[in-house]
Image (tube, grey):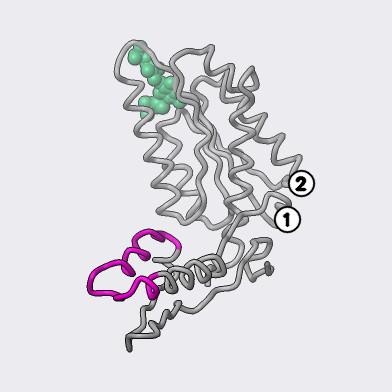
Amino acid sequence: MATSALGQCNLLPRTKPTQLQSPRHPFSLSFHRQSLITSSSRALSIFTQPEGFGSVIDQKRCREEYQNRFQTCAVRELTGSVTSTQGHRFAIVVARFNDLITKKLLEGALRTFKSYNSEDVDVVWVPGCFEIGLAAQQLGKSRKYQGILCIGAVIRGDTSHYDAVVNATTSGVVSAGLNSGTPCIFGVLTCDTLEQAFDRAGGKWGNKGAEAALTAIEMASLFLEPLE
Ligand SMILES: Nc1c(NC[C@H](O)[C@H](O)[C@H](O)CO)[nH]c(=O)[nH]c1=O
Ligand SMILES: CC(=O)[C@@H](O)COP(=O)(O)O
C-alpha cells in the first residue's frame, strides 16, 4: 500500500488491462479494470459462450488465470482520512427554525471539529432548512472551505408542508455540493415528532450533528489534491 499525492489516502498500485491468451486459439481477451471489478460473473461468462474457447481444459485454465488476475489485480482505493484536519476550513450552515434542536446539533458538530483539532470553523445561520441549499452553494463556490456541514430539523406538522421542506432541503444540499464542487454534508433531521428529534440531538440515539461533522472531515480529506 502506498501513500499518494492525495495526502493520507491509501492507494494500491494500478495495473494494465489484463491479457488472457488462449493456448489453442490465436486471440486474446482484454479485460479492463472496470469489468474485472464490477462484473466478475459477466466477465467469466465470456469464457463459456459457444463462440469462445472450445475445450473444457481451456475454460478451466482461463478461469484459473482469471481468478489469479482478479485476486492480484489492484483496485485503486481512495479513502478519506479522519485522522487529521490540518489546513482544513469548514463552514456550518444551520437553520434557526426548531432551534431547540438545531442548537444541540450545532454543539455536537462543533465538539467533533474541536476534538479533531479543526478550529477553523465558520457558522452561518439561515431562517429555515429551505434556505440551507443556497447558502451552502455560495459558501462552497467561495472556495474558502473544504467542507460545508448543513444542519437543520424538519418536524412533521398536520399538512404536506413537511414533504415540501424536506424535499427542497435535500435537493438543495445535493445541488450545492454538485454545483460548487465542495462536499456539502446532510446533517438535517427529518422527524415525525419533537421527541424523535431530541433523541437524535444528543439524546438516546446520539447526536447526528456530531456524526455529520465527522463525515465532513472525511469528505474534505478526499479532495486535498486534485485527482489524477
Ligand atoms: N417547517 C419547517 C421549516 N419551515 C420554514 C422553511 O424552511 C423556510 O424557512 C420558509 O418556508 C421560508 O422560505 N423549516 C425548518 O427548518 N424546519 C421545519 O420543520
Ligand atoms: C414542516 C412542517 O410540517 C411544519 O412546520 C408545518 O406544519 P403544518 O403542516 O401543521 O402547517
Please state which of residues 63 and 84 is positioned toward the viewer in this rendering.
63
Going by the picture, which residue comes out furthest to the left?
51
Position of 187 relative to 56 (above/below): above
Front residue of this view, candidates 99 and 54: 54
Disc 1: CA contacts within 10 A as few (<14), some (14-19) or many (>=20): few
Q: Tag 2, which secondary structure?
A: loop
Q: Say if mark 1 contacts mark 2, CB within 8 Å.
A: yes
| Residue 94 vertical placement versus 44 (above, below) | above
* Magenta part of the chain: 37-59
Q: Which residue is mark 2?
A: 117
How would you classify the magenta stretch by its main secondary structure?
helix
Could you say where residue 194 lies in the image, as x and y percent from the top left?
Answer: 51, 13
Residue ID for mark 1: 86
Pinpoint residue 136: horizontal percent, then vertical percent.
48, 44
User: Which structural element holds mark 1?
Assistant: loop
Quadrant placement of the N terminus: bottom right
Along the line of sight, the residue nearer the viewer: 144 or 77: 77
Q: Is residue 53 magenta?
A: yes
At a point 59% along the width and 43% down the height, the residue shown is 215
The part of the image, by quadrant, that contains residue 71 is bottom right
Mark 2 neighbour class, 10 Å CA radius: few under 14, some 14 to 19, many 20 or more: some
The structure residue drawn at horizontal position 52% and vertical position 16%, both measured from the top left corner, is: 196
Q: Could you say where residue 10 lies in the image, as x and y percent from the top left?
A: 65, 62
Q: Quadrant of residue 34?
A: bottom left
Q: Is mark 2 within 8 Å of ligand 1?
A: no
Given the image, on which type of amino acid does mark 2 rest? Asn
